[in-house]
Amino acid sequence: MGIKSFQGPRAKTVSKKEYNAPILVTDYMTRKLVTFTPEQSILEVMEQFTKYNISGGPVLDSNGFLVGIISEADCMKQISESRYFNQPILDKSVEKFMTKDVETIPSDMSIFDVAGVFHKNNRRRLPVMENGLLVGQISRKDIVVAALKLSGANWK
């Protein structure tokens, strides 16, 4: 004999509503980037920062490979040294001041994991890579925006 279950007229069938919100870096990263070359001058970089209202960006070699990242902090170092040594800013190249040991993340990383990376380091942005190529960049602000969009969802 088997056990029979009975659902009366007041019984409710509970179904779990799945919310498949986009939670990957690829869903929130910036794809159109302002990039720089190692040969560019720091002055030109600062002009681009102002023109595009950005605070940093990836540095690519002539083949399009990521070789560094340049930021406002790198520029501040140049400005400070220029005054100290009484030299113009114009003649210094990005290569001398960019961060060469660049931390990158994969495009399929979750925004939660990236939030942890940002929490552990002092970076404002991270280059996003796929198969060894730069495909975008994600910033702290992008993660905040993603979290706001997901604020009503139950995360898995």
Image: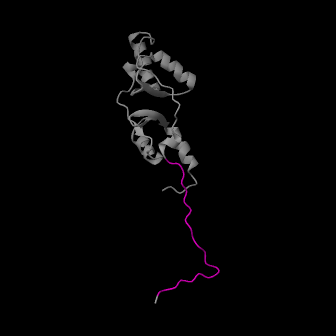
Relative to residue 82, is residue 58 depicted above or below? Answer: below
Relative to residue 4, is residue 113 depicted above or below? Answer: above
Q: Residue at x 53, y 83 (%)?
A: 5
| Front in this rendered view, residue 124 or 66 | 66
| Front in this rendered view, residue 123 or 112 | 112
Q: Majority secondary structure of the magenta segment? A: loop
Count of marks, rendered view: 0
User: Magenta residues?
Assistant: 2-23
Q: Quadrant of residue 99?
A: top left
Residue 55, horizontal then vertical, whole percent = 50, 28
Residue 135, horizontal then vertical, whole percent = 46, 34
Q: Is residue 13 magenta?
A: yes
Residue extending furthest front? Answer: 1
Residue 72, horizontal then vertical, whole percent = 47, 25
Q: Is residue 123 magenta?
A: no
Q: Quadrant of residue 90?
A: top left
Relative to residue 42, is residue 23 depicted above or below? Answer: below
